Image (spheres, grey):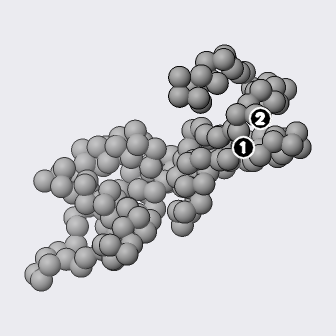
Amino acid sequence: TMKKKLIGILLSTAMVLGLLSGCAGAPAAPAAGGTAAAPLSPKEFRELYRLASSHYVLPLVADAVWDTPLVEDGASRKLLSEAAFREVVFQVRRTVGFLDLYAFLEEKGLRPAVMKGIVLRSLYPEPEQRPSTDEDLLVRPEEFDRCCEALSEYGLQVFDPGTLRGAAAGA
């Protein structure tokens, strides 16, 4: 069924990324007498595209299916490659922007811990293919006010430092 095929593609993507390495190994070959996956129908392709886009993994899925017979239609391949390229470019821009911000914080004598986002992306074979729309910083309580001031000086809007401080303290 279409759902099983799409789940298989997403699982193959995970395996390609090495997320299952060490516990699942390489993707299994087709069972004896089995055949390679047939190309996706237009309906299946639209659903794959929608799912990959909504979960922000379009470049990863595009990479996983590119050298397979799953997406043979020229228009679908073009749509997939252009959308994946666009997402990768946007991610590179966001990464450069974050690294500039972090360098600014370091110039101010601040070194917050970077959580998730850019750190986890570095575990992927092609980090720019895994988008992140924000970066989480863990700031020492004694540096919190200085960090808020630095972020504001950098041009970012700090909505309510009191609320943020309360959330950081577990209030």
Q: Secondary structure at mark 2?
A: helix
Residue 133 is marked as none
Q: Label 2 is placed on what type of residue?
A: Glu
Q: Find residue 45 and report its horizontal and vertical position in percent.
A: 30, 49
Left/right placement of residue 96 relative to residue 12 reads: right
Q: Quadrant of residue 110?
A: top right
Residue type at mark 1: give it. Answer: Pro
Q: At x 53% / y 28%, what residue is drawn?
A: 170
Instruction: Name the residue located 39 percent from the left edge and 72 percent from the top edge.
Output: 21
Q: Can you identify the residue that label 1 sits on?
A: 112
Residue at the spot of label 2: 143
Label 2 vs 1, first from the N-terminus: 1
Q: Position of residue 148 (x, y in %)?
A: 76, 27
Of residues 9 and 165, which is closer to you in this image?
165
Residue shown at 25% from the left, 60% from the top: 8
Q: Nearer the viewer, residue 121 or 145?
A: 145
Circle 1 sits in a helix, a strand or a loop, which is it? Answer: loop
From the top left corner, tell me how far across and down residue 6 is, in percent.
25, 53
Q: Toward the viewer: 76 or 152?
A: 152
**For this view, does 66 lie left or right of residue 110?**
left
Left or right for 140, reference 107: left
Tell whether label 1 touches label 2 (CB within 8 Å).
Answer: yes
**Outermost residue to the right:** 107
